């Protein structure tokens, strides 16, 4: 109540935009955060984590936009940003949209090798389809369900480190460990194939493999490889 005893005027709730266009909204913040981390790191042993300010800000922005009910178009070159924030993703190539879908659909069922490369780290290697299995120089892998080319068709196989296993082997494909990178709970390996191509695979860090070890690459239990008929 005011000094004169009158009821205060009702304040209208702020009206947000019905449409919002954001172009790389976190780029400047990420750059500033990096400078802040570097400055702080000069004072003490400080390392930013993936749960830091940028990642928290993404969640906050997503919640605010959803509460506002605003139709938002996010334009970004950061695939993690797109997959984390969007309800639907449009993957664009020069002059055209290649695929539209949920982040899960676009990542798990890319319609082409170019989409697969854009939405996550992967290797695309040639192979031949035979009876639900694709034979490649890295080994043989079960193919994902769905429409497939006829047997004997040359295809491109999509291999992702998280969907593969690697074991020491003295037979089969001449594949050897080229390098390894310790990532904590797992170690990522680069395995060189006879052609010189390198396939990334993961293995529990407690079961380390040395460089130069002869190995066999397999799909993880339950994992199936996506194949494309065009590069």
Image: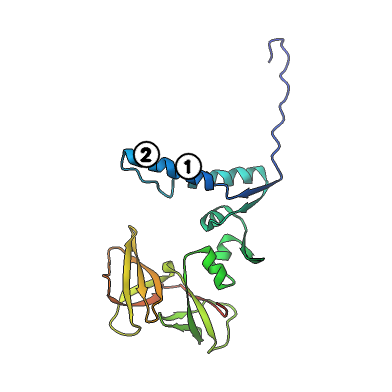
Above or below: residue 108 compared with residue 185: below
Q: Residue at x 53, y 53 (%)?
A: 81
Front one among 182 and 164: 182
Q: Residues within 10 Å of mark 1 (few under 14, many from 20)?
A: few
Q: Residue at x 55, y 77 (%)?
A: 231
Give the tally of numbered discs: 2
Judge whether residue 195 can be spotted in this image.
yes
Q: Which comes before the other along the chain, label 1 or label 2?
A: 1
Give the residue number, with chain letter if any, for mark 2: 40
Q: CA distance from mark 1 to mark 2?
A: 12 Å
Looking at the rendered structure, the secondary structure element under dot 1 is helix
Judge whether residue 109 can be spotted in this image.
no
Looking at the rendered structure, the secondary structure element under dot 2 is helix
The quarter holding residue 100 reads bottom right
* Drawn side of residue 123 relative to residue 15, left or right: left
Report x, y in % for residue 196.
38, 78
Q: Residue at x 58, y 65 (%)?
A: 106
Report x, y in % for residue 34.
44, 45
Give the residue number, with chain letter if any, for mark 1: 32
Report x, y in % for residue 212.
27, 74
């Amino acid at each position: 109540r005011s000094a004169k005893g009158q009821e205060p005027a009702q304040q209208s709730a702020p009206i947000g935009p019905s449409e919002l266009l954001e172009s790389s909204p976190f780029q400047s913040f990420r750059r500033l955060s990096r400078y802040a981390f570097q400055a702080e790191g000069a004072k003490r042993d400080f390392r930013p984590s993936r749960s830091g300010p940028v990642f928290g800000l993404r969640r906050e922005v997503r919640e605010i936009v959803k509460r506002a009910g605003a139709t938002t178009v996010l334009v970004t070159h950061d695939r993690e940003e797109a997959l984390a924030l969007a309800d639907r993703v449009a993957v664009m190539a020069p002059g055209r949209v290649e695929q539209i879908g949920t982040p899960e659909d676009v990542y798990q069922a890319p319609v082409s090798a170019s989409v697969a490369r854009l939405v996550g780290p992967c290797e695309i290697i040639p192979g031949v389809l035979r009876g639900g299995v694709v034979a490649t120089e890295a080994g043989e892998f079960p193919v994902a369900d769905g429409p497939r080319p006829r047997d004997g068709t040359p295809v491109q196989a999509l291999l992702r480190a998280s969907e593969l296993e690697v074991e020491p082997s003295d037979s089969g494909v001449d594949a050897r460990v080229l390098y390894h990178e310790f990532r904590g709970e797992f170690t990522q390996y680069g395995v060189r194939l006879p052609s010189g191509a390198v396939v990334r695979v993961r293995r529990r860090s407690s079961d380390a493999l040395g460089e130069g070890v002869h190995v066999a690459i397999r799909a993880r239990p339950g994992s199936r490889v996506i194949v494309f008929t065009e590069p």
